[in-house]
Image: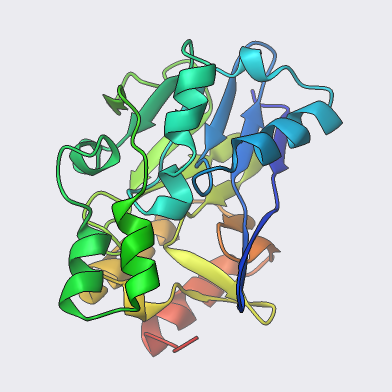
Amino acid sequence: MFKIIYTIPLFFEKGDIKVEINPVLIEDKDKMYLVDAGYPGFLQDIEKFFAQKGLNMSALTGVIITHQDHDHMGASAELEKKYPAVTIYSSEKELPYVLGKEKSLRLCQAEEQQFEQAFIDTLKEVPHPVDAVAITPDSFSGTAIEIIETPGHTPGHISVYIGSEKTLISGDLLVVKDGKLCIANEIFALDKPTIIESIKKLLDYNIDTIICYHGGIYKSANIKNELQEIIKKGYIKL
């Protein structure tokens, strides 16, 4: 049984852009998994967090990438290079994009919809790990980790559920905005109807805490009712 779940608040600032992200560290007596790795160049910030908690970064077992976006997998290449014993995991559908074997769908979207050139340039420069493996039913056997397929934001997006802690790590499926739980920014949703279907899946799980990559920890005794309301209302522009 997992004994500790850490949320790692990290901050990205560039010009007028200020973003907080929340990778998550799951620790038990002999395994440690990092869920998402932050932006490129964020390894040092992650290492500082480990040091503050008295944790050994070299003891990290694996990194679970929820999806291909650069703020989630960006530091994985640097982490892999410095800590080669760490296994990087992603869903099978996301794996070609995480490894850079296929063009980022976010970059495709940015170019097609003419996002700001600075954002496009940033996506073009994202480093990719040399090696990563597709998650299988046996990847986390013997642990409390359950992988839930929650596509829509990207085709192979996943969420991580820790049943013993009634905790869901939602990646970019959900966010906390102004203290409220809601669907992640629809601008970046590649398949909106599928996102709604993914949220419906969560109704089958016993959840009282959701850790959102954007917004952090959300606790409620009525999460199921709140999810049903989100499903009913649909998208809220952020």
- Please give the count of numbered marks on the rendered protein: 0
**The image quarter in which residue 21 lies:** bottom right
In the image, what residue occupies the spot 50% across and 42% down? 36
Viewer-nearest residue: 133 or 111: 111
Q: Position of residue 107 (x, y in %)?
A: 24, 62
**154, above or below 82, in the image:** below
In the image, what residue occupies the spot 57% across and 64% down? 214
**38, above or below 113, in the image:** above
203 left or right of 94 in image: right
Q: Is residue 191 visible?
A: no
**202, above or below 179, in the image:** above
Q: Quadrant of the N terminus?
A: top right
Q: Is residue 67 visible?
A: yes
Q: Position of residue 68 (x, y in %)?
A: 32, 49
152 left or right of 56 in image: left
Viewer-nearest residue: 41 or 64: 41
**The image quarter in which residue 212 lies:** bottom right
Q: Position of residue 146 (x, y in %)?
A: 43, 35
**The image quarter in which residue 90 lies:** top left
In the image, what residue occupies the spot 32% across and 74% down? 117
Viewer-nearest residue: 141 or 63: 63
In the image, what residue occupies the spot 66% across and 60% down? 216
101 left or right of 229 in image: left
Coloring scheme used: rainbow
Q: Position of residue 30 (x, y in %)?
A: 64, 10
